[in-house]
Structures are given as structure tokens and as C-alpha cells.
Image: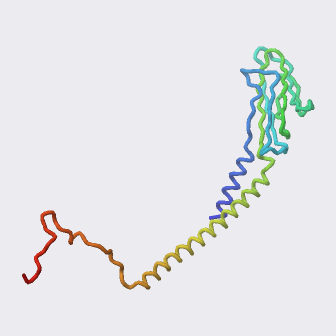
Amino acid sequence: MWPLAFLIINSLWVGISDNAAPYEINDYEHSIETRTVNLDGVLGQDRPMPATFEFHFSGQTSDSGAISWKIIDSSQQTVAEWSGTLDDKPKAWEGELNPGNYRVETTADEGILVEQILYIQPFSSYALEGHFALSILLVLVAFAESIVRKKGKQYFSNKGSTHQQLDAKAPFKRLNTGASDDDLLGLDESPWRTPKGL
């Protein structure tokens, strides 16, 4: 049973660590030239997170035109950039981003619609640590469960043997003392009786 639990928990962690959180930068209906993105680290850590920046564009009123975008970090360094024309085929950027603030600047000629989504995998950089921590936790739970089961079995067996010893020491059963309901007098009866022999 525990090997199956090990496989299930680690499979769930693989699914969680590979999951990506989307940040919508631009869509076809709401075009913004500059967008700020704040990336928080996992548990306050500063490890770089795998990122994918996907973008698509289409000409609404024009068949040609220039398009460009830049990802700039808080120290004004350009992390990634692309520039091309409406005829170019967009290719997603893949890399790593450290936690912090980023600015995405998009420039497109008149009549060109742009859609941009930034995907972040915050738990991917902790995949190995997650497998290790979950495996250790599962082993601890397995040991705790076996100890509780063993102690519980001892407790109930000791309780049963103590009860049997008490029954063996007292061969007679204790009866309730006091007057029974049969000895009580009715409302029309007198407590005084005529002595015998009179």
C-alpha cells in the first residue's frame, strides 16, 4: 500500500511542479503598450523560475507593419526582446525569470493586433526538493501509523486481560443493595402489621 501511495504523491507533485501560471499581457481586444508584471518567489525564495512568453499578432486593417516587444527587469536590463514584421512567424521565448518586477513593452504599427501571454512555472525549480520532502513525509507517516497501530493493539490487549483478571478474582457478582420496588407499599396499605400469633 505504501509504495502505491509513494507513486501517487510523487505523480501529483510532478503535475503541480510542471503546471504554469499564465499572465495575460495583451489580448486582441485590449492592447496596452506597457504592462508591469510582479513575480513573487515561492516561500520567499529567489530562485529563477522557468518562463515562456507566447505572442501572436494579426493585421486588422493592414497587411504589413512592424512589431516588437521587450521584457525589462527592475534594474532596467533587457531580459528578452523580439522585433519583426507582420509577415514573420512568431516564435515563443523560453527562459528563466527571477522573482521581481518586470515591464513588458510592446510596439506595433497601426492596425496590428497583438496577443501576449507570459507563462511562469513557480514550482518547477523546486521539483527535486518537493520529491524529497514528500518522500520523507510519507516515510514518517508510515512509521507513525505502524507505531500507533502497534501501541493501540497493546493497549487493547492489556485492557482485555485486566478485565479478565478482575472477573477471575471476584467469583460472585455484586448485587445492587437497597429496597426493591416489590417491597414498597401501595397507597392504601398500612405500614403496621399485626404480629404473628395474636
In percent of width and height, residue 73 lies at: 88, 32
| Residue in the image at 81% along x and 28% along y | 36
Residue at 76%, 31% (x, y): give it. 117
Task: Count the labels in the image.
Answer: 0
- Left or right: residue 28 versus residue 110 is left
In which quarter of the view is residue 194 placed?
bottom left
In terms of depth relative to the viewer, which is nearer, 85 or 107? 107
Q: Identify the image quadrant of residue 61.
A: top right
Image quarter in which the N terminus is found:
bottom right
Q: Nearer the viewer, residue 100 or 164?
A: 164
Query: What scheme was used to colour the molecule?
Result: rainbow
- In percent of width and height, residue 136 lies at 73, 61
Left or right: where 138 falls relative to 111: left
Q: Measured along the vertical axis of the image, is residue 73 above or below residue 106?
A: below
Left or right: residue 82 versus residue 183 is: right
- Image quadrant containing the C terminus: bottom left
Q: Is residue 167 left or right of residue 175?
A: right
What's the residue at 86%, 30% (across, down)? 71
For residue 70, above or below residue 128 = above
User: Which of 9 and 153 lies nearest the eye of the viewer?
Assistant: 153
Q: Is residue 164 above or below residue 82?
A: below
Residue 146: give x, y in percent of width and height: 63, 69
